[in-house]
Image (cartoon, rainbow, N blue to C red):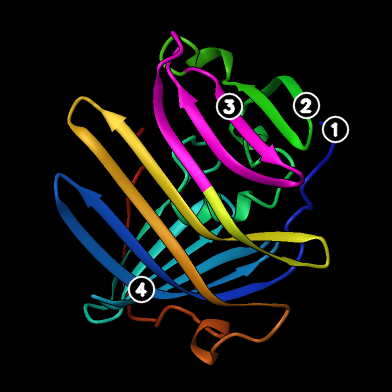
Amino acid sequence: MPFACAQAGHRVYSSFEYVTARDGDTQTSSGALLYRPDTSLTIHVTSPLDQWMVFAGDTLLIYYPEENTGLKIPSLQGKVSLPIFQLVINAGKEDLGLSAAGFELQESQMSGDTLVAVWQPPAATRKVLGNFKATFVRDSVVSVVGLTPDGRETSRQEFSDYVRYEGQLFPRSVTVTQYGGEGETKETIRFAGVVFDAEAAADMERFSLPPDVVITIVPWQD
């Protein structure tokens, strides 16, 4: 690419509000996020329920303190349907995390301060999955459009309100819209109080599962 976003190399701690909307039904949750580069992404949902999610390596752990139960979902790495939180982290990467999912940069075109890059999916999925088209303005990704093999739009990711720290970019607003036969689904996440390389709340810094927790392993399903 003619220019590149900085790799996400700093810790990030922030509160968030997450809104999903479908068929006139809106649901809102809130909590806090702690991102440790190259180790883990910890999310603590505090409303409307108490829930922990930890992405470490290729495994997702979900824990419900009130029931003292949890789920472990292995082998997430390389999947295309990344959670919206991971999209936030990937916005600070040159390849938007697409290389890890097996995508290859097919072409890029620069016009003024705008770059459009087209990423091709893995060969094994090209009968059902089309290209991803990413638009950057200067060094910030503003949208990523997912296409069908015949070029129809199936999803749109929009990034805005960036904060910058020592070359690292972090979008404080991300919206993901999915289009399908059953209608449109929209997810929006907004961050407040974003801080870098600072200690998070004590419960997030030292989160660990209690010894008597009941964990169920659930295979990932595409």
Q: Provide the residue designation for mark 3.
A: 133
Q: Provide the residue designation for mark 2.
A: 110
Q: Look at the picture and state if 214 lies above or below 110.
A: below
Indicate the quadrant containing the N terminus: top left, top right, bottom left or bottom right. Answer: top right
Tag shown at residue 30: 4
Q: Name the kind of residue labelled 1 in the image.
A: Pro
Residue at 61% across, 68% down: 35
Q: Are marks 1 and 2 in contact (CB under 8 Å)?
A: yes
Residue 220 seen anywhere in this rendered image of the structure: no
Q: Name the kind of residue labelled 3 in the image.
A: Lys
Q: Nearer the viewer, mark 2 or mark 3?
A: 2
Label 2 SS:
strand
Magenta span covers which residues? 130-158
Our reading of the magenta stretch's main secondary structure is strand
Q: Earlier in the sequence, mark 1 or mark 2?
A: 1
Confirm whether the magenta stretch covers residue 23: no
Q: Provide the residue designation for mark 1.
A: 2
Q: Earlier in the sequence, mark 1 or mark 4?
A: 1
Image x and y of residue 45, in percent: 36, 74
Cα–Cα gap, marks 1 and 2? 8 Å
